[in-house]
């Protein structure tokens, strides 16, 4: 008789991921493949009063059909941010039944700022891309943690 797969089995077999850098104004998303161990910015979701646009979140997940979701953990003491992160994870778990993996994301926004600054983009364009690039860095951090 075949054994039912548990959450860890599903994570171990995952190949396609979406990572989210959750914020109180914007949430950046990036998609990536374990095969290539690369991540690509995939969009920004507007957050109003700590509430995500769930239609946009769901559409992104349905577009990429990930095997698992990576959520950046800022290790913050901000109760508003922590509530937004927990609400996000609850929504994904309830509606998509995907494994959720927390990844330490401290300094990813700073690294995203440095990366964008080096590209010579306008301030508006940097603001548009910052959270997506941070999400890509979160996903690459996860991929790097699997090596070795």
Image (cartoon, rainbow, N blue to C red):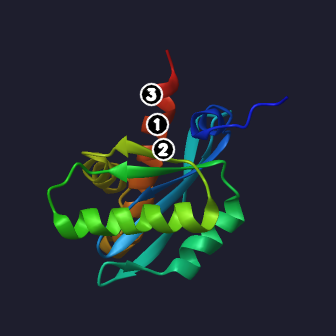
Q: Secondary structure at mark 1?
A: helix
Q: Is residue 121 above or below residue 16?
A: below
Residue at 49% across, 14% down:
148
| Tag 3 residue | 145
Residues at circles 1 and 2 in contact by the CB criterion of under 8 Å = yes
Q: Is residue 113 left or right of residue 77?
A: right
Q: Secondary structure at mark 3?
A: helix
Residue 126 visible, this angle: no
- Mark 1 burial class by Cα count in 10 Å: few <14, some 14-19, many 20+: many
Q: Position of residue 87 (x, y in %)?
A: 39, 69
Residue at 82% across, 31% down:
2
Q: Position of residue 116 (x, y in %)?
A: 36, 56
| Tag 1 residue | 142
| Disc 1 from disc 3: Cα separation | 5 Å
Residue at 31% across, 78% down:
50
Hey, which residue is sitting farthest bottom in the picture?
Answer: 48
Quadrant position of residue 82:
bottom left
Q: Is residue 25 left or right of residue 61?
A: left
- Mark 3 burial class by Cα count in 10 Å: few <14, some 14-19, many 20+: few
| Disc 1 from disc 2: Cα separation | 5 Å
Residue 13 visible, this angle: yes
Q: Secondary structure at mark 2?
A: helix
Residues at circles 1 and 3 in contact by the CB criterion of under 8 Å = yes
Q: Is residue 130 left or right of residue 95?
A: left
Instruction: Quadrant for the N terminus, please.
Output: top right
């Amino acid at each position: 008789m075949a054994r039912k797969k548990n959450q860890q089995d599903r994570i171990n077999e995952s190949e396609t991921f979406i990572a989210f850098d959750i914020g109180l104004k914007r949430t950046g998303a990036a998609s990536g493949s374990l095969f290539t161990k690369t991540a690509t910015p995939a969009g920004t979701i507007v957050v109003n009063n700590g509430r995500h646009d769930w239609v946009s979140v769901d559409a992104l997940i349905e577009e990429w059909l990930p095997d698992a979701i990576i959520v950046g953990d800022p290790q913050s003491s901000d109760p508003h941010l922590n509530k937004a992160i927990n609400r996000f994870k609850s929504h994904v778990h309830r509606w998509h039944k995907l494994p959720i993996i927390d990844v330490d994301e401290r300094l990813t926004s700073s690294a995203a700022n440095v990366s964008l600054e080096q590209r010579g983009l306008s301030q508006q364009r940097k603001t548009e891309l910052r959270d997506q690039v941070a999400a890509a860095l979160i996903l690459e951090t996860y991929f790097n943690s699997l090596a070795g």
